[in-house]
Amino acid sequence: MDQPITIVGGGIGGLAHAVALARRGIAATVLERAPALVEVGAGVQISPNGFAVLRDLGLGDALRAVSVRSQAVRLVDGPTARTVVRMPLGGRDYHMVHRAALVDLLAQAASAWGVALRLGTRVAGAEDGATATLRLDETTEQVAFAVGADGLNSVLRVALNGSDPAFFTGQIAWRAIIDADAPPEAQVWMGPGRHLVAYPLGQGRLNLVAVEERADWTDEGWHQPGDPDRLRAAFAEFAAPARDWLGAVDRCHLWGLFRHPVAPRWHGGAMALLGDAAHPTLPFLAQGANLALEDAWCLARALAQPDRAAALVDYQSARAPRVGRAIAAANANARNYHLRGASRFAAHAALRVAGLRPELLRRRFDWLYDHDVTARGPNGPRDR
């Protein structure tokens, strides 16, 4: 059996990676700084590319049981509530789910596969070498190999790449969940300098993510409390039902959106990165969790190879162009959702025309959603 892998971070990517390793006969330990696996007030969209990984991990039916299957993406003009375009998703596996439910599924699977989960364990620093050195709050541990699934502020990313600058995008975002019913679709309400995303999570709950352009900034991390009244004021010109949804918010969280470069190095002698630790993305394409799931599966495959060093080179070279394209698409959405004046009118008119053939709109993203890292053909995995 291969030497155990130590995974820093017990979120979606870290837990999925642990399960993927265990299914290949590689023991894994997950170090999670939180005292419990609790996700606060947030939904996540799982598209077919992410679902393919969950299905391969044996969790496809379990996800279907706790999620809402999305039937369409609807773009709406916020001030008038008029549908600009509705893109049906063709009955494929697009799912909307509370993050806590997905993390719980992954944690149960990890436990069933014998993964060790150490809660309340903060990794404050790391050094790469023949083995990985992890500095905890009170001790230092040497581990055979460490995987950084520790998100935007990854200590393993710093160990491999040093500190790199992040810059404020001029946008802040709120997250909230309210009690409300809505059609089984993801809605994007677009307005000048702002947009609102809404989708159901089941059991009468609606997930809201509201993004506003703002000159001042707030720190990264979306556990900061926000002001519901300021949220409502920012979207006061939106029509019902969006205005009504925001009226029902009694608690929200706020965070500033920063752009980070893709890490130059995703691996070293005894370390590797996945998900946001390697390639943070803005939340305008709903791909953060899906790309992390893809990474988790691909990195597990690489770590199971006899020539691990060569496999890690292949891992980064195969993944980097894809995540770069997804990040660019997310950045473009950030601009397109917030158009003003004549450009806004022209863009909406073009979308309405395109909506006459919605299947063509959907095909523009086949490269993203149809990608299945678990698929095998005569030449091996599709992403190699």
Image: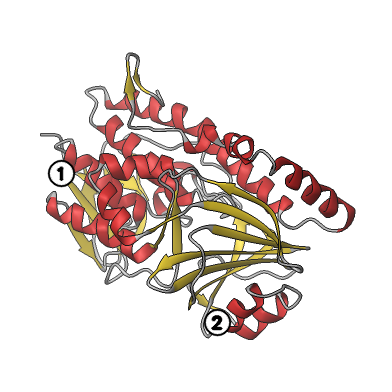
**Residue denoted by label 2:** 249
Q: Quadrant of the C terminus?
A: top left
Q: Residue at x 15, y 44 (%)?
A: 27
The answer for how far apart the CA atoms under marks 1 and 2 are is 43 Å
Q: Give the mark nearer the N terminus: 1 vs 2.
A: 1
> In the image, what residue occupies the spot 18% across and 39% down?
23
For residue 12, side relative to residue 354 (left or right): left
| Numbered disc 1: secondary structure | loop
Taking depth in this image into account, of 63 and 173 the one nearest to the observer is 63
- Residue 58 location (% of width, % of height): 22, 44
In the rendered image, the residue lying farthest to the top is: 378
109 sits to left or right of 136: left
Q: Secondary structure at mark 2?
A: loop
Residue positioned 44% across, 45% down in the render = 91
In percent of width and height, residue 220 lies at 55, 65
Quadrant in which the N terminus appears = top left
| Residue 8, visible in the rendered structure | no
**Spot occupied by residue 286 in the image (x, y as percentages of width and height):** 52, 52
